[in-house]
Amino acid sequence: MADLKFFRCKRCGKVVLEVVETGVVPTCCGEPMELLVANTTDGAHEKHVPAIEPAGEGKRIRVSVGEVIHPMLPNHYIQLVAIARGDGTVEVRRLSPGDEPVVEFCLHGCEAADVYELCNLHGLWKASYPA
């Protein structure tokens, strides 16, 4: 599975998911956007690595942001959770402060998927299913 590429504007914070790779770095606010590199391990007190478990007889997965649920405060929250399935399909769920950082995705018959989450303060995190 190819990694998803997320870019963030250093000035305004806009996030872009690259759908078609062209080799051109997107720009925003007159500057090239920063490529976000996904972390896969976490030593922080608030856990960021997506915790994934089967749901609904194995046809769905439940994603909790971290083993310890991540805070969802106005100044520190999860902006999105995304799934990249083995068949190439991608689904993104946006979250807001106050939302529970737990989402479910249908696997649509795929055996494997990568799950990403983006924290507004600590960046991009990734886990694979099955682990």
Image (cartoon, rainbow, N blue to C red):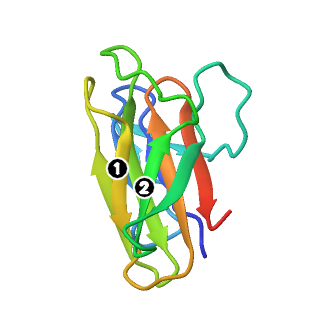
Q: Is residue 14 visible?
A: yes
Q: Which residue is mark 2?
A: 62
Three-letter residue code for mark 2: Arg
Determine which residue is flagged by label 1.
Answer: 103
| Number of residues whose C-alpha sits closer than 10 Å to that of mark 1, classed few (under 14), some (14–19) or many (20 or more) | some
Q: Are marks 2 and 1 in contact (CB under 8 Å)?
A: yes
Q: Residue at x 42, y 55 (%)?
A: 62
Instruction: From this view, report whether residue 96 is shown above or below residue 56.
Output: above
In the figure, is residue 127 to the left or right of 71? right
Under mark 1, the amino acid is Val
Quarter holding residue 46: top right
Residue occupying image coordinates x 48% and y 83% = 110
Q: Position of residue 118 (x, y in %)?
A: 46, 39
Distance Cα–Cα, label 2 vs label 1: 6 Å
Earlier in the chain: of badge 2 and badge 1, it is: 2
Tell me residue 111's x, y (percent).
55, 81
Q: Looking at this view, name the residue that lies furthest to the front.
A: 57
Residue 123, placed above or below residue 1: above
**Left or right of residue 50: residue 19:** left
- Coordinates of residue 89 in the picture (x, y in percent): 39, 77
Q: Position of residue 11 (x, y in %)?
A: 39, 25
Task: Please identify the quarter of the rendering in which residue 56 is found.
Answer: bottom left
Q: Quadrant of the C terminus?
A: bottom right
Q: Kindly identify which numbered label has been placed on residue 30.
A: none
| Residue occupying image coordinates x 37% and y 30% | 13
